[in-house]
Structures are given as C-alpha cells and as structure tokens.
C-alpha cells in the first residue's frame, strides 16, 4: 500500500489514496474542488521509501475538498478568586474534510489512485472523519 507524508496547517499527516482526513481549514477553498499538496516530506510503500530534505521535489498529492465546517464550541473560563473577576470566552476551530485521490512520485508517475481502489464515498465515512 502506497502512502505519503504531507505537511499542511503546520501538521504532518500520513495519507493513503481513498482516505478521508480532517485537517486545518484551507484558505480560499470551496467544496467539490481539487486541492494539490506539494509539500511532500516522504512517500513510499512496504518495500521502499523516498525521503526528502526537507521536501521531495516534484512529488505531489491530489485531493478533493468535501466540506468546510467548524468544531464544537470550546469554552475558556478564567476566574480569579476573591477578586470578583471572571472572564468567559468561546472558540470554534474551523476545519476541512478532504479525500485523497492520487499520489504522484517525484518524476510525475502515479503511485496510487483512489479511483482504482473504487472506494465509494459514504456519509458515514464523512461523519467518522468529523468525530476524529
């Protein structure tokens, strides 16, 4: 099984084609569009691996953006006892759900293709990714 390690949103993700991921919100992105990740740190399979220094030049990963949304509200409550001082604040982190389609090597050859795997996108898969 071919995989790649991509960097997006200040985090690193090990991805396989056909996989559904919940990542930091991508700026200026609309649902049902293709996204291309060019910051590939490594790619390979069970037998061999190609590691970049720091990135593998020419390698890329294609994905489809499924949806953009926000997480549940996280409350931040600060209280200073005996000072009659308290502050309540909330935060909702934005995220994007993507589906990995293709993994390309540094010479442009397709290493893994989600259409060949033929995994059908189901609403249950999206809900499972949201809960991660």
Image (cartoon, rainbow, N blue to C red):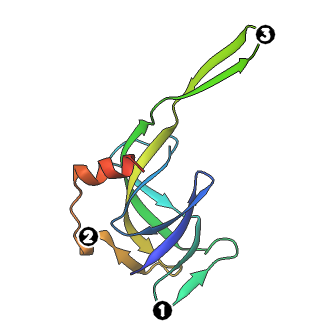
Mark 2 / mark 1, whichever is N-terminal: 1
CA separation in Å, label 1 and label 3? 63 Å
Q: As drawn, which residue projects farthest toward the front? A: 82
* Closer to the eye: label 2 or 1: 1
Q: Tell me which residue sits at (42%, 79%) in the image.
A: 2
Q: Nearer the viewer, residue 118 or 14?
A: 14
Q: Residue 3 or 109: which is nearer the viewer?
A: 3
Q: Which of marks 1 and 3 is nearer the N terminus?
A: 1
Q: Name the element at disc 3.
A: loop
Q: Give residue 93's position: percent from left, percent from top.
A: 52, 36
Provide the residue designation for mark 1.
Answer: 47
User: Residue at (69%, 14%) from the top-left corner?
Assistant: 86
Pointer 1 with pointer 3, Cβ within 8 A: no
Q: Is residue 126 left or right of residue 14?
A: left
Q: Confirm or deny contact between disc 2 and disc 1 (CB under 8 A).
A: no
Quick check: marks 3 and 2 in contact, CB under 8 Å? no
**Residue topped by disc 3:** 83
Q: Is mark 1 on a helix, strand or loop?
A: loop
Identify which residue, 96 or 132, lies in the foreground.
Answer: 132
Label 2 and label 1: CA atoms lie apart by: 23 Å
- Which residue occupies the extreme bottom position in the image? 47
Q: What element carries label 2?
A: helix
Q: Residue furthest right?
A: 83
Q: In this view, does 31 lie above or below 61?
A: above
User: Disc 3 to disc 2, how far (Cα)?
Assistant: 62 Å
Image location (x, y in percent) of residue 94: 49, 37
Q: Mark 2 points at which residue?
A: 115
> Compared with residue 100, is residue 116 higher up or lower down, i.e. above or below?
below
Dot 1: within a 10 Å radius of its alpha carbon, few (fewer than 14), some, or many (20 or more) residues? few
Q: How many labels does the image show?
A: 3
């Amino acid at each position: 099984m071919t995989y790649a390690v991509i960097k997006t949103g200040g985090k690193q993700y090990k991805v396989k084609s056909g996989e559904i991921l919940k990542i930091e919100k991508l700026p200026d992105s609309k649902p049902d569009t293709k996204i291309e990740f060019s910051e590939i740190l490594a790619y390979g399979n069970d037998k061999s691996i190609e590691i970049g220094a720091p990135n593998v030049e020419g390698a890329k990963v294609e994905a489809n953006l499924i949806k953009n949304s926000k997480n549940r509200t996280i409350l931040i409550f600060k209280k200073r006892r005996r000072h009659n001082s308290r502050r309540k604040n909330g935060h909702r982190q934005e995220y994007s759900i993507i589906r990995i389609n293709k993994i390309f090597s540094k010479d442009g050859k397709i290493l893994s293709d989600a259409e060949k795997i033929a995994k059908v996108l189901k609403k249950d898969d999206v809900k499972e990714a949201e809960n991660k």
